[in-house]
Amino acid sequence: MKFNIKEITRRGFIATTVKTTLGGYLAFSYGSAIAAVLDQKDTRIGLIYASRYGATADNAAWIAKGAGLDVTLLDIEAINVSSVINRYDRFIVGSGVWREGIHEAIRTMMTKYAAVFDEKLIASFVVCGTQPNSEENKARIAGYFSGIHDPLKQPPLLSQALGGRLRVESLSEQDYELLSNFYHNILKTELANWDRTDPAAARSFGEQTNRQIRSVQTRRVSGAV
Ligand SMILES: Cc1cc2nc3c(=O)[nH]c(=O)nc-3n(C[C@H](O)[C@H](O)[C@H](O)COP(=O)(O)O)c2cc1C
């Protein structure tokens, strides 16, 4: 059997190319998978939250539990933002809502570190009394989120309004007076305790955050982003 030298060279070339490409591809995919797992495990997540009466702090803890990753809970009133901002690979930011707005320190932080959050903010949440059960309420909640998102080029892929609570006996004198007037004059009811916290919903939001971090990580390792 006669071989055409050009043909052998061509076949050899194709075989070598296929082997090299496939081998390279498998090694790359395998490496990507491992890197993704390692990256995800090693990803340090800072969850910065603002809470006055505790419901936002509780929601933050439930989200961290659902995320099941290396999440550090950071109370905005207990940290120096400038010294923690570089310690984390990803951030989740959340705030309670009082008098139609989020905590001023969260608003200030988002403006000051917009470039960092443009890159690292994976999810945001607000904890409030308003439920997203009408168009009017949804617009109101969107207004609360604007305090977090407005300084950014675009909002994070994940955002959720979570239920808060009111414990009349815990209110400051000023808040008691404000809410009593609001309940009497506008809602025409007595100021009373309510609790709309939902640990399962917050945990589920944490799980979604985990999936989001995993998908960003995988895309990043495989060079898609
Ligand atoms: C003084 C005061 C004002 C509030 N104003 C609003 C409001 O404008 N819109 C809203 O949806 N919820 C409002 N709430 C409900 C809070 O969002 C809810 O109590 C939430 O749990 C607060 O978070 P925290 O428990 O972490 O402080 C208000 C609560 C208080 C005490």
Image: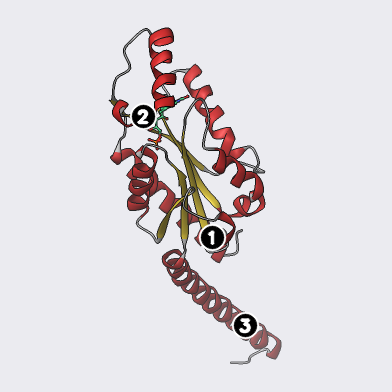
Q: Which residue is mark 2?
A: 171
Label 2 residue near ligand 1, CB within 8 Å: yes
Establish if 72 lies above or below 114.
below
Residue that numbered label 3 is attached to: 11
Ligand 1 located in image quadrant: top left
Mark 1 or mark 3, which is nearer to you?
1
First in residue order: circle 3 vs circle 2: 3
Q: Nearer the viewer, mark 2 or mark 1?
A: 2
Instruction: Estimate the spatial distance between the alpha carbons at disc 3 and disc 2, rounded to whole Å.
Output: 81 Å
- Viewer-nearest of discs 3 and 2: 2
Frontmost residue, 13 versus 202: 202
Hey, which quadrant is residue 18 in on the image? bottom right
Quarter of the image for residue 132 reads top left
* Outermost residue, front side: 173
Using the rendered image of the protein, determine whether residue 134 is visible from the camera's viewpoint: yes
Give residue 219's position: percent from left, percent from top.
54, 59
Tell me the amino acid under the disc marked 1. Answer: Val
7 displayed left or right of 55: right
Residue on which the image places disc 1: 84
Q: Is mark 1 within 8 Å of ligand 1?
A: no
Q: CA distance from mark 2 to mark 1?
A: 30 Å
Could you say whether the residue bearing mark 2 is in a helix, strand or loop? loop
Query: Rounded to the nearest whole Å, what is the CA distance between mark 1 and mark 3?
Result: 58 Å
The label number, if any, that marks residue 59 in the structure image: none
Residue 113: % across, % down: 64, 51
Residue found 30% across the figure and 35% down from its top: 198
